[in-house]
Image (cartoon, rainbow, N blue to C red):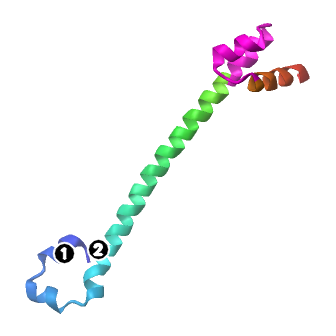
Amino acid sequence: MSKKEYQKMKEEEKMEMTFEQATSGLIAHAKEEGQRIGEKRGEKRGEKRGEKRGKKEQQMEIARNLLAEGFSVDLASKVTKLSKQQIMKCQKVLETQ
């Protein structure tokens, strides 16, 4: 039973209902609402993770391009805001290609 249906009932009908009958619809509504909220949170988290991952990949690509053009590890680190260790990993990848 939905909340609206319950509100439309007469007082006598409400009193005759068992606790289980009265709350079953409300519990179902609460579950649906909880799922909806959870889905929205999950979508937001997924979007943030995707954006973060994409930004990281872009920074790595810029670092690889800088290194391929002969720029130093220090400069690539400053430009991309990646650590020198991360830049050196890019450099190793370039050396193996």
Q: Which residue is mark 1?
A: 5
Labelled disc at residue 26: 2
User: Who is closer to the viewer here, 55 or 88?
Assistant: 88
Residue extending farthest to the left is 11
Classify 10 Å Cα crowding around label 2: few (below 14), some (14-19), many (20 and above).
some
Placement of 68 over or under 52, stated as above or below: above
Left or right, residue 85 beside residue 49: right
Labelled disc at residue 46: none
Count of residue discs: 2
Q: Residue 65, position in %: x, y?
A: 74, 14
Residue depicted at 58% across the width and 34% down the height: 52
Left or right, residue 27 beside residue 46: left
Placement of 86 over or under 44, stated as above or below: above
Q: Which quadrant holds residue 71? A: top right
Dividing the image into 4 quarters, which one contains the N terminus?
bottom left
Q: Are marks 1 and 2 in contact (CB under 8 Å)?
A: no
Dominant secondary structure (helix, strand or loop) of the stretch shown in magenta: helix
Residue type at mark 1?
Answer: Glu
Q: Which quadrant holds residue 31? A: bottom left
